[in-house]
Amino acid sequence: MKLQMAIDMADTNEALILTEQVAKWVDIIEIGTPVIMRCGLEPVRRIKKSFPGLTVLADTKIVDGGALECGDAVAAGADIVTVLALADETTIGEVVKTAHENGRKVMADLITVSDIAAAAKRLRDLEVDYICVHTGVDAQKSGRTPMSDLKTLLSVIPPEQAAVAGGICPDTLPDYAALKPAIIIAGSALAGAEAPEETARKMKEALR
C-alpha cells in the first residue's frame, strides 16, 4: 500500500517545504486542486525537479479538454493525472491515451458519483489505472466518510487499482489499511499536522 499526501493549503514554496519534510515516508505527493487553481502547474514542476524519485500526482480533476489538460500536466512532470469519473467517456479516453503515451498513469475521482460499482466497471473498461473513492471536504462536515464507498469499490475492482480519500487520519488509517487499497490519501491530517514528518512516519509504519 502506498501513502499519498495531498497538499491543498499551500503555495509553491510551502509545498516544497512540506515535501522535503515528508519525502522519506510518503510514496506520492499530490498537488491538490486548490494549489493548482492558485499557482498553476508550477508546484508540480518544481517538486518533480527537486524530488525526482517521488511520484507526483497533479489533482487536475479534468472534466473536459482531456488531451490538452493532461498533456499540460504531463509536461509539468506529473506522474499521475486525475480525471473526474463524471466526465464524458471521450474525455476520459483522451486523458488515458495522453498519459499512457507518455508513460504516465491516470486516477479517476469518483467524487459525487452515486453508482460506484457501475462507474468503476466503466472506468476499468476505459483502462484507467487507479479508481479513487473520495468524500469531499464539504461532505465530511455532515459526518460522511469514504469507508462504505471503498467497500463497494473493492467489490468490483482488485485492491491494486483502488484508492481512497476523505478525512483519513492516523486514528482511522488502520481501518482503511485493513482493506488493502493500493493508495491511501491523507490531506490535512498529514499536510496540516504540527509535525508532518513524524505524522508521516507513523502513518507509513502503520501501513507496513
Image: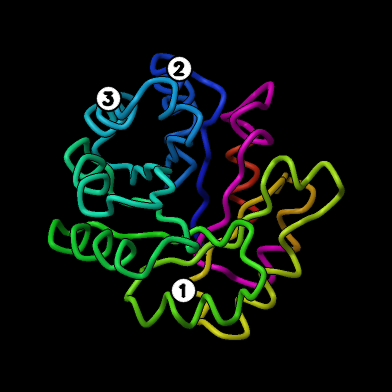
- Judge from the rendering whether residue 117 lies leftward or rightward of residue 78; answer left or right: right
Q: Nearer the viewer, mark 3 or mark 2?
A: 2
* Residue 73 % position (x, y): 26, 41
Q: Which residue is mark 1?
A: 160
Q: Decide: marks 3, 2 in contact (CB < 8 A)?
A: no
Residue at horizontal 41 percent and vertical 30 percent from the top:
36
- Amino acid on which the number 1 mark rests in the picture: Glu
Of callouts 3 and 2, which one flags the residue occurring earlier in the amino acid sequence? 2
Rendering quarter of residue 58: top left
Residue at horizontal 39 percent and vertical 18 percent from the top:
12
* Residue 84 % position (x, y): 46, 56
Element class at badge 1: helix
Rendering quarter of residue 69: top left
Q: Which residue is mark 3?
A: 46
C-alpha distance separating marks 2 and 1: 32 Å
- Amino acid on which the number 2 mark rests in the picture: Asp
| Label 3 crowd bin: few (<14), some (14–19), many (20+), radius 10 Å | some
- Judge from the rendering whether residue 167 lies leftward or rightward of residue 155; answer left or right: right
